[in-house]
Image: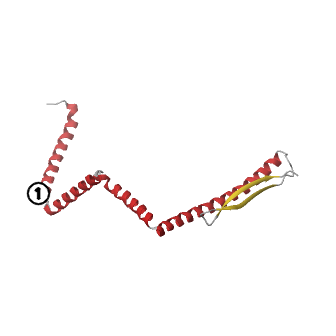
Amino acid sequence: MHDALLAPIVDLLESAEAQAGEALRELRQYASRVELDPQALRESEARIEALHAAGRRFRVRPEELQTYAEEQRARLKDLQLAVDPEALQREVEAAAARYAAAARKLSAKRKSAAQAFSKAVTEGMQRLAMFTNLPTKSLFTRERKSSWLKSRSSTLAFSLAAI
């Protein structure tokens, strides 16, 4: 006999025992109906062995083979570019085009910022009562032709002139 305060716990445990016994019977019935495919098992084991052999061959863990293969594909692409001057030239032209597009975008932002900066400096100096008739000018010019790009880089000049 046990303590009466433990009765609810004992009931729960007895219920859990009954459910576990029922689950065990269901699993045994399922296992008796499952037909194992020996050919599929041999194929799976052969594939696993091939992965382990490849891991040993390339000195990487089997679970790292996917990453290793991707790295080797990238390396192969780089090597192929090195022996194919036309492909290498295409890569250079594509990189130059990306650079030129980024440079144009940056130049547009710099030009806009220079104009806003010019206006802010003029207003700030006028508020400080410095040079009340101070003309300011922001010069955004395109200079310096790049030696390997067809575009030009930009420079910013900011001048103050007191009258």
Residue on which disc 1 sits: 32
Q: Which color scheme is applied? A: secondary structure
118 vs 66, left or right, is right
Instruction: State the image quarter where residue 144 is shown.
Output: bottom right
**Observer-nearest residue: 90 or 48?**
90
Residue found 71% across the figure and 56% down from its top = 156
Instruction: State the image quarter where residue 151 is shown.
Output: bottom right
**Observer-nearest residue: 114 or 82?**
82
Identify which amino acid the numbered label 1 is placed on.
Answer: Ser
Q: Quadrant of the N terminus?
A: top left
Instruction: Say above or below: 91 vs 1.
Output: below
Q: How many marks?
A: 1
Residue found 21% across the figure and 33% down from its top = 6
Q: Residues within 10 Å of mark 1 (few under 14, many from 20)?
A: few
144 vs 82, left or right, is right
**Residue 40 placed where, x, y %?**
17, 62
**Residue 79 placed where, x, y %?**
41, 62
